[in-house]
């Protein structure tokens, strides 16, 4: 299994999939669905510095709370530059890693286009433990910074204009050619001081079931599930009946190793979308160590 390369993207906040109805209308999710699919999220790579470029094209529409498609199209292109540092430090018997992620986004919503830097994420604390050979668990903490341009409620925004806190756990089974991984995330959004809007807490689960099919080639299923657990509020009052989102997507993933570099391609489609953007996304991702 390609543990050394793929693990560098664990916990990474991948590509901004564009604004949705849930959360504050017009703002992106803290972590888009599918951000860490095909990644052995439970394991940290060996000590060193790593770089990854995660690239996505998304074509879709906005759906209401009953699952009806609204006359609002959404197209997005994004690249997230990820930097990973593994200093070789052990914490509580596990290996430590820190990360920083910079998203570059172009999105088009109902004819309105926006381009620029999205919300930068820093992840200062991530620890992975090996439970047994090939079996790993991990936990981490991340902060989404309000660096993306914010235009106002209901507009096409590149950022949330709030501080977002994320907690996550990951599990990976990396034996017999398998990458069977689950990455569970819990996000808490701050209050937007521009309009007193507070998006409800949400969970996101990314999953992977890929198997080696030939030397340096892996193929399998990937997907994600998102659920908003708490209602949106504005001025302390419940907004639009709670405005809670839900999304389920499934797809196929392929990985190819070229020496120390890993290429990963994923194609996913939302089969369920409620108060959420739903559509098809194509990801092309590269992970590699950095040597000086």
Image (cartoon, rainbow, N blue to C red):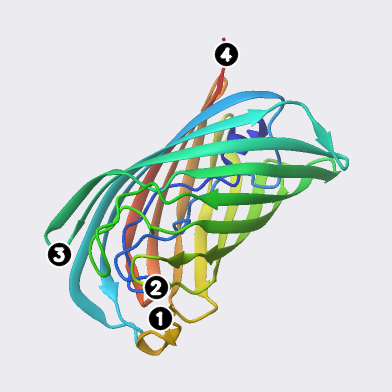
- Using residue 161 as the reference point, say whether residue 149 is left or right of it: left
- Using residue 112 as the reference point, say whether residue 46 is left or right of it: right
Q: Nearer the viewer, mark 4 or mark 2?
A: 2
User: For the point 67% across and 45% down, which residue is it?
Assistant: 178
| CB atoms of marks 3 and 1 within 8 Å | no
Q: In the depicted view, which residue is nearer to us: 11 or 163? A: 163
In the rendered structure, find residue 291 and report the number of the disc placed on it. 4
Mark 4 surroundings: few (<14), some (14-19) or many (≥20) residues within 10 A: few
Which secondary structure, mark 2?
loop
Q: Earlier in the sequence, mark 4 or mark 2?
A: 2
Mark 3 surroundings: few (<14), some (14-19) or many (≥20) residues within 10 A: few
Q: Which residue is mark 3?
A: 110
Q: Which residue is mark 2?
A: 196
Q: Which residue is mark 1?
A: 235
Q: CA distance from mark 3 to mark 4?
A: 44 Å
- Residue lying furthest left in this view? 111
Q: Earlier in the sequence, mark 3 or mark 4?
A: 3
User: For the point 35% across and 49% down, which residue is it?
Assistant: 148
In the rendered structure, find residue 276 and report the number of the disc placed on it. none
Q: Is residue 144 above or below residue 286?
A: below
Q: CA distance from mark 3 to mark 2?
A: 25 Å
């Amino acid at each position: 299994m390609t543990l050394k390369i793929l693990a560098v993207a664990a916990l990474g906040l991948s590509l901004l999939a564009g604004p949705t109805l849930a959360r504050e209308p017009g703002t992106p999710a803290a972590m888009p669905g599918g951000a860490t699919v095909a990644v052995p999220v439970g394991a940290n790579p060996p000590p060193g510095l790593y770089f990854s470029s995660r690239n996505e094209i998304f074509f879709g529409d906005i759906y209401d709370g009953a699952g009806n498609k609204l006359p609002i199209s959404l197209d997005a292109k994004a690249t997230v530059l990820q930097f990973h540092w593994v200093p070789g430090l052990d914490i509580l018997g596990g290996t430590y890693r820190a990360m920083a992620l910079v998203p570059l986004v172009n999105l088009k919503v109902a004819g309105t286009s926006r381009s620029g830097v999205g919300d930068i994420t820093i992840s200062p604390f991530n620890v992975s433990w090996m439970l047994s050979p090939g079996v790993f668990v991990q936990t981490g903490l991340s902060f989404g910074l309000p660096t993306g341009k914010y235009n106002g409620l209901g507009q096409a925004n590149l950022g949330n204009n709030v501080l977002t806190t994320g907690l996550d756990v990951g599990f990976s089974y990396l034996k017999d050619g398998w990458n069977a991984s689950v990455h569970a995330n819990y996000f808490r959004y701050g209050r937007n001081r521009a309009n007193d809007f507070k998006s409800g807490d949400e969970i996101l689960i990314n999953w992977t079931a890929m198997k080696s099919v030939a030397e340096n080639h892996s193929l399998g299923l990937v997907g994600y599930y998102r659920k908003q657990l708490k209602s949106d509020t504005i001025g302390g009052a419940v907004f639009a009946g709670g405005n809670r989102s839900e999304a389920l997507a499934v797809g196929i993933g392929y990985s190819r190793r070229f020496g120390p570099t890993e290429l990963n391609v994923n194609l996913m489609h939302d089969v369920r979308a409620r108060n959420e953007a739903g559509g098809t996304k194509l990801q092309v991702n590269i992970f590699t160590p950095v040597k000086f």
